Image: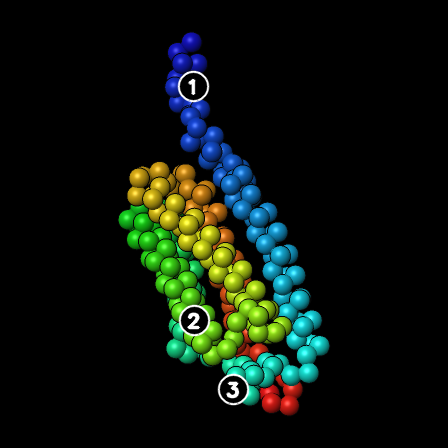
Amino acid sequence: MATDSRALTTTDHGPVAAADHGAQGGISNVVLGMLLFITSEVMFFAGLFAAYFNVRANAAQWPPINPETTEPFHLAILPLVGPATVLLILSSFTCQFAVWGIQRGDRTAFIRNIAVTFALGIVFLMMQAIDYAVLGSEGLSLSAGTFGTTFFTLTGFHGAHVFGGVIMLGVVLYRGMAGQFSARHHDAVEAVSLYWHFVDVVWILLFSLLYLLPGTGPAA
């Protein structure tokens, strides 16, 4: 009976152990759910990219002529989009540093890095909003033909995903400051980091496609 008593007292049946069981024996439900969600988002953005390439391939000239300047529309990398891209890439690193911090039980490193990631996400959104205002003053809007429609659809949906990611990061930061994560219990942190990395990769593809890919046509 004494042996059975010790066995009962040393066996952890708490909720944290139940949550950790999935992490030790395989992927947790939270992370799996996020991966499935990201899979659906990959298909969503793949459809948008396919639509963009279809419109671009059927255009006589890309970017088209801006009727206000009689020159092709120009998407400037500086002074806003290039630095914003660097900041978003940097935020992916700080997000991963936060994951590694909580995995080793370093809450200070976790909170510091997740706070920096949260701030960089907000700065990116602000810079994108300013860039929209600048483009609007130059005649590029959602109604400016297929070029404007595809540009603002692609970047707008991505911006919405960044906004959603910033909200997730804010929730994780709040919960982390409340002491709700530990080296054994951090599935939500890993799930949010996966989403943020996905958002980062999508922007790299968008940046390469919209700003770096050479134009076509007579004025290209």
Q: Is residue 153 visible?
A: yes
Looking at this view, is 42 or 30 the one in front? 42
Q: Residue at image x 59%, y 80%?
A: 63
Considering only order in the chain, which callout, 1 or 3, is on the residue closer to the N terminus? Answer: 1
Marking on residue 133: 2
Looking at this view, is 34 or 82 the one in front? 82
Residue farthest top in this picture: 1
Picture coordinates of residue 167 (x, y %)? Answer: 42, 50
Report if the CB atoms under discs 3 and 1 are less than 8 Å apart. Answer: no
Considering only order in the chain, which callout, 1 or 2, is on the residue closer to the N terminus? Answer: 1
**Which type of secondary structure does the marked residue at label 3 adopt?**
loop
Real-space Cα separation, disc 3 to disc 2, in angstroms? 17 Å
Residue farthest bottom in this picture: 218
Looking at this view, is 25 or 197 the one in front? 197
94 sits to left or right of 45? left
**Which type of secondary structure does the marked residue at label 2 adopt?**
helix
Three-letter code, disc 2? Ala
Considering only order in the chain, which callout, 2 or 3, is on the residue closer to the N terminus? Answer: 3
Three-letter code, disc 3? Thr
Q: Residue at image x 50%, y 77%?
A: 139
Picture coordinates of residue 81 (x, y %)? Answer: 44, 73
Residue farthest left in this picture: 108
* Badge 2 density bin: few <14, some 14–19, many ≥20, Cα 10 Å: few
Marking on residue 69: 3
Marking on residue 7: 1
Compared to residue 206, the image places residue 96 above or below, namely above
220 sits to left or right of 193? right
Picture coordinates of residue 195 (x, y %)? Answer: 50, 53
Name the quarter where the C terminus is drawn: bottom right
Q: Is residue 81 visible?
A: no
Real-space Cα separation, disc 3 to disc 1, in angstroms? 81 Å
